[in-house]
Image (tube, coloured by chain):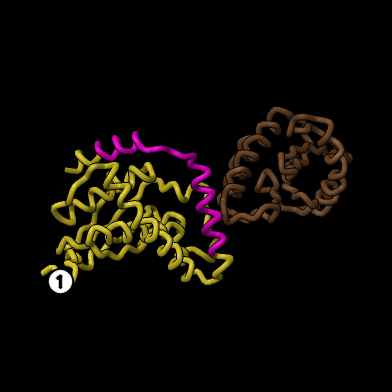
Chain colours: A yellow, B brown
Amino acid sequence: MSKKYDKLGNDVFNKVEKINSELFTLTYGALVTQLIKDYEDIEQVNIKLEQMGYNIGIRLIEEFLAKSGIGRCSDFIETAEVIAKVGFKMFLGVNAHVGDWDANRKEFHLTIEDNPLIDFVELPDQYKHKLYYSNILCGVMRGALEMVQMKVKCTFVKCTLSDDSTSEIKVVLEEVLSDMIPVGYD
Amino acid sequence: MSTFTFLIIGKNDNPLYEIEFPITVQKKETYVLQYIAHGSLDIVEEHVWKSNNMYLKIIDKFNKVQISSFVTAGHIKFLLLHEKKDEDAIKNFFVEVHDLYLKILLNPFYEYNKPITSTAFDAKVRKIGTKYF
């Protein structure tokens, strides 16, 4: 299953339009530093980044489904593979790995290899373990999955900027939203 | 044994970074060196407009101390105070530090023309310095 999505991820990545990665990285850097200046409270910045990501996610899922041609996933394990192998590859051009499943198969850790958002970035000491610089990614995943009836919670557990060895996002499936039937149709 | 002092000077002649090679040498007479470096800044300014290159070679002398300089496109000055003359090594050193400096500039948390406090930068400059001097 993983192989299939590996290939699909590469195919879609080759198809989509690319932009200069430095422009992308610097734009995101400017955004984060501006947020820090505006809010002054790091916790607020994390929240804001997540919300921005959410707004991106609920749009991006349409594009994702249209370009990749992926249908409904059979279970959450497959969903995780699709996010890691196709989603991250398609939009960020990086590989991500799924691991550390819990017993109920409702929680996993996503490890991101060379995250392009953090190129050149060096966090000042006072922000380490406080600011989740790439928190926008958490929001994107939450927004995208919500549009396909999955309510998840994403949190950064490790970040290379805070001297951890890898960047890891914990994704927890909270509930599968039932398809809503409009009033009067039952 | 001859020592090398490397300084990065900002746009308004404010110091951004300073290091001495070889690193084991005890700091002494630093203020003299700073005084010499400061005195040469005006001469750097003169040379900047005479050359198309960023590397300006030896621009000034004070007793035994020679001063080489390198000026980035953003008018950040790199100065190297040295007693031995070894242009190739100095040039390569400047070019490599310039590369590092560019990376620092791309860091969104670094403000232009502010002192460089990054430990990673410091470690890499030390490495380059020990390689050449």
Left or right: A80 with respect to A58? left
Query: Is residue B5 shown to the viewer in this render?
Result: no
Q: Is residue B98 magenta?
A: no
Protein chain holding label 1: A
For label 1, the SS is loop
Q: Which residue is mark 1?
A: A184
Locate the C terminus of chain B by quadrant. Answer: top right
Q: Position of residue B31 (x, y in %)?
A: 82, 54
Q: Residue furthest front?
A: A184
Q: Position of residue A163 (x, y in %)?
A: 45, 57
**Who is closer to the viewer here, B5 or A6?**
A6
Side of B132 where A29 appears, left or right: left
The residue type indicated by label 1 comes to Gly
Closest to the observer, B4 or A14: A14
> At 54% across and 66% down in the image, what residue appears?
A126
In the image, is A69 to the left or to the right of A54? Answer: left
Q: Which residues are magenta?
A: A7-35
